[in-house]
Image (cartoon, rainbow, N blue to C red):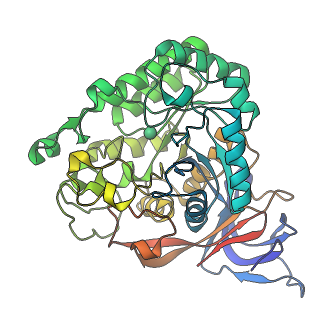
């Protein structure tokens, strides 16, 4: 067990914050990055052989549902942070749609304490925008930030009340923290999958793309009105991304995330396809038509949208990746009718293999992949992290890009293996994760 001092030898080091990309050793002493370069072996330092591996700053996920407090059958602080470390993540921001919701300084402080007690990775709570996520009464915006929240979100739902959204964005000007929005016009979104050819073929009620795009448009206008910082979650449609690109060109204070499942999977997966779109990976075995494990919100979109989103990574419209890790216990997914199944996919342990497959298909470079999972999400958190700078806390991930593994519940650290990737072979896995130089995962 590594406890703060280790030499990570011979890996391909990518550290976009410092423009580093090459074969180097990384020496960690007492939890701090001490040296990046060709390091002479020292007798007193244990070594980790990273030959053939990618060595990067620990990955940061801005969008995780830990389900804690309140839903231990889905995930807990323990299992969620273990899944994060197993995916190469050393820091996550957790969403407040818990029971109780993260809507007060006391609940935020309690979560931070329990994350500390779990002692695995860094956890940055996001507070709600409205009390109990009810949508009708704002939280004390200042108090929850003072307690340690990194922003506000009613994720899972849109805050329908535009006046409250305006207030939240005004608080964001004052406090320089993001209002993190899940964009969904509820009245249009009673369906269970993307509304289009596949939903009509399967006879499943659909959710039109405009249900998302209408709210992205509204929130961009409110951000422009107030000058507040809007962070748009899990953008899933080409037109939604186009709205963002246009707003960014005009100088609106907006950031946005895109999820691997919206890039590599499409609504055809609901119909049984298991083609990892936009990658060179062989397809998996066909799944059951209308497999509840393909149900997610926003829904998997047509292939044309997955391509449009990839182009928006190239042009800088998206600021970072995120997983939207959304564990659900098996009874809420399997066996139930598609319409009745819970929405959400397990994500933390698939971030590396899915984005690596997209990078290998040259939609973006491996360097940009690392950038969008490290230093860029750190900026959203307003944290000086996501780098291998000398003197920085040694939060590090080592990935073996060639390791093949079969997705089974036993292979995963999360409590909930709700993913349509079950039974498929992934290529690429985190093999060594360090937080403050301390070993948090080894495979
Ligand atoms: Zn959401």
Residue 194 percent coordinates (x, y): 25, 40
Is 365 left or right of 274, judged from the image as shown?
right
Q: Looking at the image, can residue 81 be seen?
A: yes
Please report the residue visible at 27 percent of the width from the left and 62 percent of the height from the top: 275
405 sits to left or right of 381: left
Above/below status of 188 relative to 46: above
- Location of residue 213 in the rendering, given as x and y in whole percent from the top left corner: 36, 27
* Residue at 74% from the left image edge and 35% from the top image edge: 147
Residue 129 falls left or right of residue 36: left
Ligand 1, image quadrant it occupies: top left
Of 213 and 156, nearer the camera is 156
* The N terminus sits in image quarter: bottom right
Indicate the position of residue 128 as horizontal and vertical percent values: 57, 32
Q: In this picture, is 264 found above or below 199? A: below
Q: Quadrant of residue 236?
A: top left
In this rendered view, identify the residue nearer to me: 326 or 30.
Answer: 326
């Amino acid at each position: 067990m590594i406890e703060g001092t280790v030499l990570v030898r011979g890996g391909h080091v990518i550290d976009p914050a410092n423009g580093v990309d090459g074969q180097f050793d990384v020496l960690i002493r007492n939890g701090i990055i001490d040296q990046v370069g060709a390091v002479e072996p020292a007798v007193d330092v244990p070594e980790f052989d990273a030959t053939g591996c990618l060595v990067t700053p620990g990955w940061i996920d801005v969008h995780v549902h830990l389900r804690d407090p309140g839903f231990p059958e889905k995930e807990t602080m323990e299992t969620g942070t273990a899944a994060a470390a197993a995916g190469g993540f050393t820091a996550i921001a957790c969403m407040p749609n818990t029971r109780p919701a993260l809507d007060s300084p006391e609940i935020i402080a309690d979560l931070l304490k329990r994350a500390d007690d779990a002692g695995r990775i860094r956890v940055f709570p996001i507070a709600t925008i409205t009390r109990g996520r009810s949508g009708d009464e704002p939280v004390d915006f200042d108090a929850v930030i003072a307690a340690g929240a990194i922003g506000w979100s009613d994720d899972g739902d849109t805050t329908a009340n535009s006046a409250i959204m305006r207030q939240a964005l005004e608080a964001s000007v004052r406090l320089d923290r993001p209002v993190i929005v899940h964009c969904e016009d509820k009245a249009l979104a009673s369906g269970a999958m993307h509304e289009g050819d596949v939903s009509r073929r399967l006879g499943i009620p659909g959710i039109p793309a405009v249900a998302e795009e209408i709210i992205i448009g509204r929130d961009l206008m409110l951000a422009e009105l107030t000058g507040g910082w809007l962070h748009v979650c899990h953008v899933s449609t080409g037109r939604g991304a186009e709205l963002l690109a246009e707003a960014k060109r005009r100088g609106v204070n907006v950031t946005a995330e895109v999820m691997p499942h919206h890039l590599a999977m499409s609504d055809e997966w609901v119909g049984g396809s298991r083609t990892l779109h936009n990658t060179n990976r062989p397809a998996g075995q066909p799944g059951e038509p209308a497999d509840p494990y393909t149900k997610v919100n926003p829904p998997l979109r047509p292939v044309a949208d997955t391509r449009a989103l990839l182009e928006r990574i190239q042009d800088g419209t998206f600021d970072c990746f995120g997983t939207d890790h959304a564990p659900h216990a098996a009874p809420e997914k399997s066996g139930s009718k598609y319409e009745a199944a819970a929405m959400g996919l397990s994500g933390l342990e698939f971030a590396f293999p899915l984005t690596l497959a997209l990078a290998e298909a040259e939609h973006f470079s491996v360097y940009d992949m690392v950038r969008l999972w490290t230093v860029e999400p750190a900026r959203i958190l307003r944290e000086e992290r996501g780098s291998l700078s000398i003197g920085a806390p040694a939060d590090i991930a080592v990935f073996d890009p060639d390791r093949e593994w079969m997705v089974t519940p036993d292979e995963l650290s999360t409590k909930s293996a709700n993913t349509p990737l079950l039974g498929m072979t992934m290529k690429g896995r985190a093999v060594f994760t360090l937080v403050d130089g301390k070993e948090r995962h080894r495979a």
